Image (cartoon, helix red, strand yellow):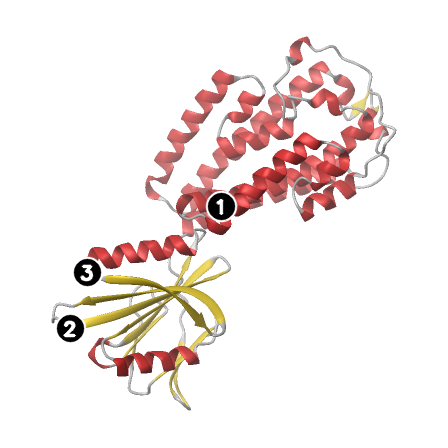
Amino acid sequence: MSSPISLETAIPSELDPSAEHRSPAVALLLSILFPGLGHLYIGLWQHAKWLIVCQGIALAVVTYGSGTLHGQAILMVLVVYWFAMADAYFSAREWNAGATSLLTGANPRIAAMLNLLTKGFGYFYLGDRTKGILCFFAVSAVQVVLLLRTNVWTSILAITLQIAIAADAYRVARERLLASYPELDQTDHGQPGAIERANPGGLLPAAASAIFLILGISTVVGFGALRALSGHSVNAKGILEQGPFGLLYRNPTEHIELTAPASWEYSRPKDTLVQLSGEEGCSIIVIEQFAIYAVASTIDANKAQVRETHSDAEITSSHAILNGHSAQSFEASFTNRARLLIHQRYIVRRRSLKVLFFIETWSSPEERQIIDGIEKTVRI
């Protein structure tokens, strides 16, 4: 990704097809394995290096990061995968036609990806610094207004703005490229152009473009919708019945099942799947939320909420096993208004695009034994 060139002064040149043919399909498949591998196959070392480094950093943030940064890293992972597949396919075709050098500093796909991720840096790449700065501040300001009241539609609209400027960067770059190098056009006086002639057969560019476009828009819009839903609770109703070992709660929609003592009471407070309560405040609450943020962020937020509610709370991190699955957890101890020592345990486990919470409350060793018994009946 070198410095931009002035396309207005570039001199058109005849294409020199490469003697070393590269299969666009192989480049695409290698990029599916990991971004950058398709570019290594073609011989585009600089592109491969940037893609591998960017994807590696993004995956590290997804694995170890938290908060908003974690969510943005997820978007970057998806966008880099999308870009790598599309760019590898078309770069292989351009390599075969000897057109690779003509796109240096003016690749429409790079301009589009940069605008999608940065809200304007694609224009910098093309040399339009003023336009890039104005675009960044304008889009950012509009997105702030839209997200004052975040919902699915405002979030999708905010993401759509970035898709729009990505499409505009692609348009601008391609128009300049074809103005300087008309031999890059797909047709030449009604006949197949040089790139088409160098790549007979295989997946047609029109079909590939449609696939990449649909995949890209679906990914970004889907991410916007998920970001809007993030933090909202799942409200799937469960079934309560007397089982052979006590009070059986089943939620077929969310595939959750647990058994509490027959004497316990059932309730369903707002934003919970179920609350099962015994005497003296002993209880288990099950909550499930949509979440693109890391589990660590969710745990930190719950710890902060406990400390805010109970200034004397003592909190210790721990590890839990729930239905044979590893889960993160922490325990908090504090005194309630009746000066009774209360213990709570938060068990948090990611389930695909959702996070499941088990909030256990007890005040005596005997109640803790009952809670431990209920944990053993959990099926998820």
Q: Report the residue marked by disc 2.
A: 340
The crowding category of the residue bearing disc 2, from other C-alpha atoms within 10 Å (few below 14, some 14 to 19, many at least 20), is few
Q: Tell which circle, 2 or 3, labels the residue nearer the N-terminal end.
A: 3
The crowding category of the residue bearing disc 3, from other C-alpha atoms within 10 Å (few below 14, some 14 to 19, many at least 20), is some
Q: How far apart are marks 1 and 2 (CA)?
A: 41 Å
The crowding category of the residue bearing disc 1, from other C-alpha atoms within 10 Å (few below 14, some 14 to 19, many at least 20), is some
User: Horizontal and vertical percent for residue 333?
Assistant: 24, 67
Asked if residue 339 is positioned above or below residue 149 in the image, the reply reads below
Asked if residue 177 is positioned above or below residue 19 in the image, the reply reads above
The numbered dot on residue 310 is 3
User: Horizontal and vertical percent for residue 23?
Assistant: 81, 39
User: Horizontal and vertical percent for residue 12?
Assistant: 76, 12
Q: How far apart are marks 3 and 1 (CA)?
A: 32 Å
Q: Distance between the residues labelled 2 and 3?
A: 13 Å
Which kind of residue does numbered mark 1 sit on?
A: Val
Disc 1, SS = helix
Residue at the location (82% across, 16% down)? 14
Which kind of residue does numbered mark 2 sit on?
A: Leu
Left or right, 240 with reference to 45: left
Disc 2, SS = loop
User: Horizontal and vertical percent for residue 57?
Assistant: 54, 42
The residue most toward the bottom is 244
